[in-house]
Image (tube, helix red, strand yellow):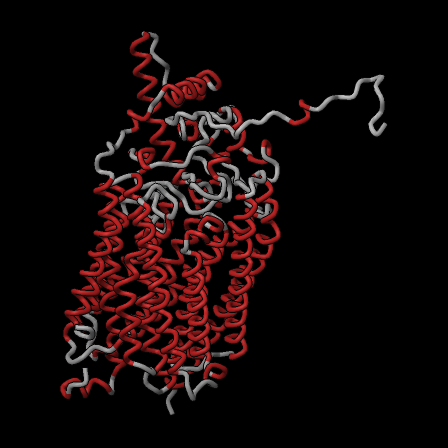
């Protein structure tokens, strides 16, 4: 990518990046985030007996629970990261994507996939695959979409010359893995195997979706945006290599750790546990690498908002990895499996890590794309603090609730005791969730005001001098 | 290899993924290949048939509306009930998945945390080798109790009322209401409601411990010497 022929393009990256599409992806992502969070709030209210919409089929909390997870995974995170990819890949390879028309087609197709998934779930057509409840008749469309995504982004990567930067290692692998993961999880347990074998694949699917789709796109983006914002290279290239290859080798080996103590053979469960502990050690090197990069420019964490989003996400990442290495052991599983601990962990990963990163990327890119600074720094700060404190409270609350629930169940107390005992935790969770939601409302307000600013700036520029 | 396109595409992207698929997914598939996968028709058993015919007796109008009139000929009637029961199992599973029941109720009993005392024998692989576990419904969260030994523990009436308005029979339950499985009242389940009732009653009906109840122990009160009316007062 450093060759001389590509040189002239460096000065005009705006021609390589279809910024309008990046904006569209981000706005779609935020739309789904709102829908998802409303669904989450509905379910949280149901648990504390405050659901005002009881008995309505289309607003059934069970169905909205699935919309909550699917809208976050495929609506918010996938759209957000695809938007980021449309910014990052052309800038790194100095080549446009395979086809801009294809990019728009992918955008439209992906929204159709997400919306029809939501529609299918609302009508009771869900598939019995956690995080993959997409009705079976949409799966082939989604699969085709993922193939197009891979073609669109792998073309410039293959065309570019010279060694690849770390970001592109993660992205290249992610495009291959996502396609394979989706195919494996959505078709094999539905059409080819049942029972315990299907369980093993279901576990692998949930696991790979986070680890081989979201995680590599997330870390790849961090390797791109952090050095640019800090104006210095990543601390250690060696650690980057360890982090990537460690993830690539160990991560896919662990799907079964989601189903410990099931009838899945014990030796496979042990294997999954051991490789999980291994991967947690390896990926912590990535966090170390990024904190090493911060050496000498630590103040940026206070002053630079995107950097603060990114590094808070990394702290949560380190926490979840540490938590993972403990909770994956059979000792912990006996206590916390099936409890709210798991729910807390999922929120910490999806909101605490990946949403933080996407928010940071959006906080960085919207002003650059629209050519005006954020309308209000204060609203941006509120967005950050409400989100950060909200998720921290929610995760601590649910993780603790899980420990209590585990002990209540193990002590053979009547089931009702565990429900009654969970009430204070569930109550606090409602308010933590409302806080996180408020943060996003501040973001939306700020976004609207900034867009107005950009329109005003454009009108001013158009005036004859 | 470590930083080249082909290395990352072929080794990390394809080879490591394939390695994981073989070791984590193909191994259990091969290990359980000898266990035959049962169809819904093969899953209908005496215990379930009893509950299914109980539905026909309790809610005759709703049952006839959903499945038509039962044949009068004895042999034809036998086959008819079996077929309708299998049909109900399939639809019941669809409702169970579509309403996300399995996101709050697991279907497997672990060998730890006293679960076998609460719910019965630890789950085994053969119990899941059937088309209703495609994909498998292990579940990942228990807001409510595990259901894989639920069949036969409670009556159809209890379940109908519970689906209609859980708090009626289980005060303090955070379970949502499902009135759309009924035509206005808990004694009028519609086709989906009847199917879900059948599905719930099927769970565990294959097991030798059916219907599973918690270990029964005589109340210590029965062993105690009750004071006679004219006997000495306690503490004398």
Task: State the residue at coordinates (29%, 43%).
Answer: A198
x then y, percent, for residue A109: 27, 57
Q: Would you say B203 lies left or right of A144 here?
A: right
Q: Nearer the viewer, residue A378 or A108?
A: A378
x then y, percent, for residue A168: 24, 73
Quarter location, residue A102: bottom left
Task: State the residue at coordinates (33%, 31%).
Answer: B90
x then y, percent, for residue B8: 19, 69
The reply to whether residue B28 is in sight is: yes
Q: Nearer the viewer, residue B45 or B60?
A: B45
Q: Would you say A98 lies left or right of B127 here?
A: left
Furthest residue to the front?
B236
Q: Nearer the viewer, residue B90 or A290?
A: A290
Residue B74, compared with residue A260, is above or below; it is above
Q: Would you say B77 lies left or right of A327 here?
A: left
Residue A446, compared with residue A174, is above or below; it is below
Q: How many labels were placed on the picture?
A: 0
Q: Would you say A241 lies left or right of A450 here?
A: left
Q: Quadrant of the N terminus of chain A?
A: bottom left
Furthest residue to the top?
B73
x then y, percent, for residue B189: 47, 26
Q: Nearer the viewer, residue A268 or A220?
A: A268
The reply to whether residue A451 is in sight is: no
Q: Quadrant of the C terminus of chain A?
A: bottom left
Furthest residue to the bottom?
A465
Residue A404, compared with residue B181, is above or below; it is below
Task: State the residue at coordinates (86%, 27%).
Answer: B236
């Amino acid at each position: 990518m450093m060759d001389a022929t590509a040189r002239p393009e460096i000065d005009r990256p705006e021609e390589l990046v279809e910024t309008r599409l990046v904006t569209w992806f981000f706005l779609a992502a935020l739309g789904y985030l709102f829908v998802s969070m409303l669904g989450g709030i509905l379910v949280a209210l149901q648990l504390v007996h405050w659901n005002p919409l009881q008995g309505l089929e289309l607003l059934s909390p069970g169905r909205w629970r699935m919309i909550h997870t699917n809208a976050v995974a495929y609506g918010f995170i996938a759209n957000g990261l695809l938007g980021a990819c449309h910014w990052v890949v052309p800038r790194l390879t100095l080549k446009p994507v395979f086809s801009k028309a294809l990019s728009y087609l992918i955008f439209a197709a992906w929204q159709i996939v997400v919306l029809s998934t939501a529609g299918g779930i609302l009508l009771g057509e869900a598939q019995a695959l956690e995080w993959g409840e997409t009705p079976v008749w949409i799966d082939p469309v989604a699969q085709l979409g993922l193939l197009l995504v891979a073609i669109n982004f792998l073309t410039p990567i293959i065309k570019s010359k010279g060694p690849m930067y770390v970001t592109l290692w993660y992205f290249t692998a992610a495009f291959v893995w996502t396609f394979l993961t989706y195919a494996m999880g959505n078709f094999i347990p539905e059409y080819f195997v049942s029972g315990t074998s299907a369980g093993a694949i279901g576990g692998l699917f949930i696991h790979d979706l986070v680890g081989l789709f979201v995680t590599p796109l997330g870390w790849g983006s961090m390797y791109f945006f952090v050095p640019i914002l800090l104006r210095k290279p990543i601390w250690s290239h060696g650690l980057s290599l360890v982090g990537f290859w460690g993830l690539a080798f160990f991560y896919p080996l662990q799907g079964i750790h989601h189903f410990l103590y099931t009838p899945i053979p014990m030796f496979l469960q042990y294997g999954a546990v051991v490789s999980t502990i291994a991967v947690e050690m390896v990926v912590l090197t990535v966090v170390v690498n990024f904190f090493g990069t911060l050496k000498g420019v630590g103040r940026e964490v206070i002053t630079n908002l995107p950097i603060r989003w990114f590094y808070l996400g990394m702290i949560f990442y380190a926490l979840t990895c540490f938590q993972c290495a403990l909770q994956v052991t059979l000792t912990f599983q006996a206590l916390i499996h099936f409890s709210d601990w798991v729910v807390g962990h999922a929120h910490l990963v999806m909101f605490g890590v990946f949403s933080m990163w996407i928010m940071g990327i959006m906080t960085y890119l919207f002003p650059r794309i629209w050519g005006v600074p954020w309308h209000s720094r204060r609203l941006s700060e509120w967005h950050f603090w409400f989100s950060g404190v909200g998720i921290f409270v929610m995760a601590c609350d649910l993780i603790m609730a899980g420990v209590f629930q585990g002990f209540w169940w193990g002590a053979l107390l009547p089931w009702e005791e565990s429900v009654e005992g969970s009430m204070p935790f569930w109550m606090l969770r409602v308010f933590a969730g409302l806080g996180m939601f408020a943060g996003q409302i501040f973001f939306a307000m700020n976004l609207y005001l900034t867009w107005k600013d950009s329109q005003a700036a454009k009108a001013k520029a158009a005036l004859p001098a | 290899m470590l930083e080249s396109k082909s290395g990352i595409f072929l080794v990390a992207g394809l080879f490591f993924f394939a390695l994981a698929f073989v070791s984590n997914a193909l191994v259990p598939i091969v290990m359980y290949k000898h266990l035959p996968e049962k169809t819904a028709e093969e899953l209908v058993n005496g215990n379930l048939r009893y509950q299914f015919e109980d539905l026909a007796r309790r809610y005759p109008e709703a049952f006839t509306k959903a499945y038509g009139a039962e044949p009068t000929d004895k042999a034809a009637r036998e086959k008819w009930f079996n077929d309708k029961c299998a049909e109900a199992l399939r639809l019941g599973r669809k409702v169970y998945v579509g309403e996300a029941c399995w996101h709050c109720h697991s279907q497997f009993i672990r060998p730890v945390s006293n679960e076998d005392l609460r719910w019965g024998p630890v789950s085994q692989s053969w119990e899941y080798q059937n088309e209703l576990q495609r994909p498998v419904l292990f579940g990942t969260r228990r807001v409510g109790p595990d259901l894989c030994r639920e069949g036969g523990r409670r009556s159809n009436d209890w379940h109908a009322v519970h689906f209609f308005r859980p708090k009626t029979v289980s005060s303090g339950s955070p379970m949502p209401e499902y009135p759309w499985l009924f035509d206005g009242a808990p004694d009028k389940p519609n086709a989906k409601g009847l199917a879900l009732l059948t599905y719930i009653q099927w769970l565990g009906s294959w097991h030798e411990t059916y219907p599973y109840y918690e270990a029964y122990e005589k109340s210590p009160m029965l062993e105690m010497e009750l004071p006679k009316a004219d006997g000495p007062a306690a503490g004398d």
